[in-house]
Amino acid sequence: MSDNKKRVMIELDNVSLSYHSRKKTFDHGTHHVLNQVSMKLYEGETLGIIGRNGVGKTTLLQLMAGILAPTHGEVRVHPGKSASLLTLGLGFKPDLSGRDNALLAAMLQGATRKRAESFLNDIAEFSELGDSFNEPVKKYSAGMRSRLAFTTALLTHVDVLLIDEVLSVGDAHFRGKAQAAMANRVQGEQTVVFVSHMADQVKQMCNRVIWLDEGRIAAVGDAAEVVDAYTQYVTQARADGSLQQTNAFQQQLEAKLLADPQLQAAFKQQFEATQKAEAQQQADTKQ
Amino acid sequence: MPFSQYFRLIDVMARMALRADATRFFLGYVWWVLEPLLWVGVFYVVFVLILAAQEPDFLVFLMTGKLVFVWFSKSVTQASSSIVSSKGLVGKINVPKTLFPMAVVQEGLYRQIAVFALLFSFLLSTGHAVTSTWWYLVPVIIVTYVVIVACAFVGACLVCLARDFIQLISLGMLFLMFTSGIFWDVRSLSDPDKIAMVMAMNPLAFIVDCYRQIMMHNTPPDMLHLLTIGAGFGALLCAMVLLMRHKSQYLALRALTA
């Protein structure tokens, strides 16, 4: 099927996003997140976005969801269509129970109270949280949080689903189950934008992939081709040591996060979870 | 977001915050009544036992002023940082930014119901009778609420622009506490022009005085003045709603990156 025949759900036209940072750590205090990005998202497709940390992947999703507005350029969403961003954590309120958080998340995404409440049993069951569902989220492990986040995300019905790394954590059992559920959803009519670090996952699930680097589109096209090119680039870059710059940026970002006591706990948990997932993936690959 | 959904969300968010607060403390909901009671205890020790205030009813005078003022100051202070402290949600869902300060204000309103109940029972126990004049409390409470919401929106926007405003707002609250006649009676100033000036310049001083006039002296408030304040802050409130709707994405960017 040709892309031209399909309806465009979201179109980004020459979109740039920059902001002034108080600390003059970036280019004269201006941080350019995205630079003249143009792209189209077609109805029913699963679009993958890959790239290193801090190249603007999440920002791209936030623009599509209408959370942020571009500094230059235009974001056009097909009239009457809603796009919703689903990501780990879902902005959990740590003092509230998993149940309350799930209810709040569903309601914030537009469900009525009754409808949101009708989701709760399904969420409790799929997330396998058991009695912990009624405990405050602050008592959850990273794995439990991600299970709750993913399940809450899965049960939301929107026209465009924007997924930010939701599948990257959790134990092997839950990851398998989550991936199957997601694949089920993706194969249907659902339009999905999927951000991930995991090359294999992107290759498996996406029709088309955008490779984002330094706020620009480095490549766009067939999933296998772009992912392979990206993997090769990362391997090459690692060998050259040209990733040092990225590491410096990452360190800055981490320092900023760690300076914020609220973010500190969340960041630490997510970091540990990602590490665990990576180790898990390595173990899986070895097998 | 439809209107009904918006208000249901505010209610749900406020109730959840109250519940979370209650589970955080050993005494839970008891704190709703215990906190204002402790205020009274502190006032009693300081003003009646130590300073031996001569004026009769001084304790009632203090409580009326302080408990109304705390409603305002706590709601506005907490609502001011509500958008930036909800960063997690702001970065994930495109919702009206007024939702966050409104949820805090609503939470404050629910708490204030308990506080007013305590205040009323205290007034009754000290020999103040409930009369038909007390009906004037309805418009006074509504105007107080409108003032709180308008200030909460302004504060929340300012803190999005620069976190530094948190410091200024808490300093501003201290300034307001001293100039609104919480610990002293504006009407006791010797110069009548000065009284008129304080009442005209500081809406909070006028509002606090309204509560006292009604509950302690059975005197209806100056309705024209009250309505002027209500209309002024109501207009500010509407302007802020429009501004925050128009600048929703900008506020999100500021909350996420500043």
Image (spheres, rainbow, N blue to C red):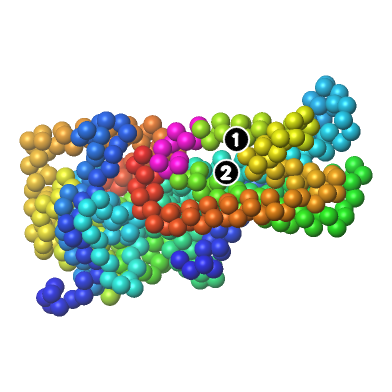
Q: Nearer the viewer, residue A264 or B51?
A: B51
Q: Amino acid at mark 1?
A: Met
Can you name the residue that lies furthest to the top here? B50
Residue A77, percent across and down?
A: 28, 67
Which residue is at 40% across, 67% downward?
A: A156
Q: Are marks 2 and 1 in contact (CB under 8 Å)?
A: yes
Label 1: chain? B
Helix, strand or loop at label 2? It is helix
Residue at label 1?
Answer: B173
Q: Assess whether residue A224 is covered by the magenta stretch.
A: no
What span is colored magenta in the figure?
B158-167
Of B188 and B137, the residue lying toward us: B188
From the viewer's perspective, tell me whether residue A234 is left or right of residue B77. left
A209 sits to left or right of B134: left
Q: Is residue B165 magenta?
A: yes
Residue picked out by circle 2: B76
Identify the secondary structure beneath mark 1.
helix
- N-terminal-most mark, 2 or 1: 2
Image quadrant in which you'd find residue A42: bottom left
Q: Which mark is residue B59?
A: none
